[in-house]
Amino acid sequence: MPLEPFKSSRSLTMGVELELQLVNTYDLDLSSSSDDLLEYLSRHPFPGTVTPEMTQSMIEIATSVQHRHGPLLAQLRDIRHALVSAGDRLNIEVAGGGTHPFQRWFEQRIFSRPRFEQLSGLYGYLAKQFTVFGQHVHIGCSTPDEALFLLHSLNRYVPHFIALSASSPYSQGVDTLFDSARLNSVFAFPLSGRAPFVLSWDEFAEHYFTKMEATGVVKSMKDFYWDIRPKPEYGTIELRVCDTPLTVERAAALACYLQALCRHLLERNEPPPEEDDYLVYTYNRFQACRFGLDGTMVNPKTSEQIGIREDILATLRKLEPHALALDSVAALDEIARATARDGNHATYLRKCFGATGSVQSVVRAAVDALRQGPAGSL
């Protein structure tokens, strides 16, 4: 069946999706409680949407379409309050973070839904290992060609979002030495990674997608696990590389950083994207996953090596007028503090472990961070 038409939306609108952990109160392991939580929430007003995910120890929340930082953050805080209150009634804790530090993947249960069961049959053990937690950010695009332009123009900035959001240093009870171990699980899927370099929607829909569909490998855009993918039914591009942060405040700041960056790119004062930009893409992605803000990236246009931290700070200076125009100065200030002073949430979780030597304390820190919001260097 042909790819559905790209639905035009207002340029630079945004929406946030967060995959969240459900945690037992008694041992802080993951809890297969999504059925109970979703049933409870269906009987009470909820300030967004909430849906199941691949396994029963996770849920996904989504905001409505937003234009500015203030209303986006307000809605995310309302969603947080509703989830925490529901969890307290059901004796379930809710947490951010890209991985649970010590859950055993083979104990997870697939949520009973046809698509999840089909994916479990196709991907085997990878489906349960996909019990990892990410933030997805949608940015509205007025035309499908604008969507593809932004998708590829953002390729060199992907390390920024990986490093800033990284919150998954622990997996299976050990420090992985990665700031974002979550993305290694995503990269195992055959249709992950980068989108093909196509800048015309007609060419993408009528040639690339049609050929892929004819192979029987894909049926819809949902079958692609690209780092950034177009979402024609929403009229957006969707950035998928971020770990779920520990706080909704950081989640809102990341979304507004992306919004400001897209506004800058749409001025088209930067060199246009080209296929050769991707020569360093996987290297830059690895550096951000492994070392976070301390990683090194290669500028695909100049071949210059620069620290990811320094590149973010230089980009923030370019985005100052866009932050003013979009009312997101507070959001980009948080990005600047995280980059220059506080570090990402992987750094925070390692500090928590260093103080106690316990992976349980890492989960407790994540639970408390979501519940209470930012404190100190968080």
Image: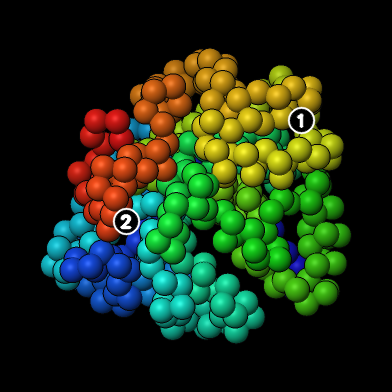
Choose top left, top right, bottom left or bottom right for residue 261. Answer: top right
Position of residue 9 measured from the top left corner of the image (x, y, whole percent): 57, 45
Query: Is there any visible trace of residue 63 in the rendered image?
Result: yes
Query: Is there any visible trace of residue 236 in the rendered image?
Result: no
Q: Is residue 26 above or below residue 275?
A: below
Cα separation, mark 2 vs mark 1, equals: 38 Å
- Mark 2 surroundings within 10 Å by alpha-carbon count, few (fewer than 14), some (14 through 19), many (20 or more): many
Position of residue 154 measured from the top left corner of the image (x, y, whole percent): 66, 36
Q: Nearer the viewer, residue 310 or 120?
A: 310
Which residue is located at x 32 percent, y 40 percent? 351
Going by the numbered disc 1, the residue's amino acid type is: Pro
Q: Label 2: which residue?
A: 359
Residue furthest front in the image: 357
Choose top left, top right, bottom left or bottom right for residue 358. Answer: bottom left
Q: Label 1: which residue?
A: 300
Residue furthest left in the image: 89
Which residue is located at x 35 percent, y 52 percent? 96
Q: Nearer the viewer, residue 123 or 36?
A: 123
Q: Nearer the viewer, residue 345 or 335?
A: 345
